[in-house]
Amino acid sequence: MSTVTMTSNNSVLQGFSSPFTSTTNPSGASLTRRGRLARTLFVASLTVVLVAGFAAKSGAGDQVVAPTSYVTVVVPGGATLWSVASAYATGDVQAMVEAIREANNLKGYDVMAGQKLRVPTA
C-alpha cells in the first residue's frame, strides 16, 4: 500500500487566498497600528462624503417657501407691465415686474389691454 502525504507549500500560494491562512490583508502582511488608523480614517471620511452627497441630492436643507397668494388683474387700456407692478408693489417695483412675469410665464415685458395677469400679493 502506498501512503499519500500532503504538505503545505506557501511559496506556491503567493497572491492567492488559502483556506488555511487567516490573513485579512490581501498582501499577506499584517497592518501596523498606523496603517489600521489610516484605513479607518479613510473609510470614515469616505462615508461622510457619501452621506453628504446623498443628503444634498435628496434636498435636505432646502428652504421652505411660504405659498404665494395671487390676485387676478385685467390689464386696462394703455397700461404697461411696469404700471401694473407699481400699483401692487409694496417695495421694489422691478422685483414685482419679475414676479408677475414668472407667475404668468411671460417671455417679454409686453402686455395687452384686456389680458388677465396673476399678480402675487405679499
Image (cartoon, rainbow, N blue to C red):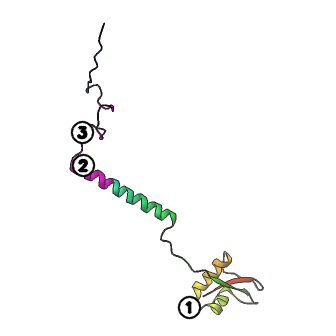
Q: Amino acid at mark 3?
A: Ala
Which residue has dot 2 on it? Answer: 35
Q: Amino acid at mark 2?
A: Gly
Please check the rendered image and state whether residue 15 is part of the magenta-colored stretch, yes or no: yes
Task: Please provide percent x and percent y for residue 78.
Answer: 74, 90
Position of 50 compared to 92: left or right? left
Q: Does the segment drawn in magenta span residue 16?
A: yes
Is residue 28 depicted above or below 49 in this figure? above
Q: Which residue is mark 3?
A: 29
Q: CA distance from mark 2 to mark 3?
A: 11 Å
Where disc 2 sits, the SS reads helix
| Residue extent of the magenta highlight | 13-42
Which circle, 1 or 2, is nearer the viewer? 2
Q: Main secondary structure of the magenta part?
A: loop
Q: Which percent across, then down, holds residue 64?
A: 53, 76
Residue 121 against residue 60 in the figure, above or below: below
Does label 1 or label 2 sit earlier along the sequence? 2
Determine the secondary structure under disc 1: loop
* Mark 1, residue position: 91
In the shown orientation, is residue 25 left or right of residue 51?
left
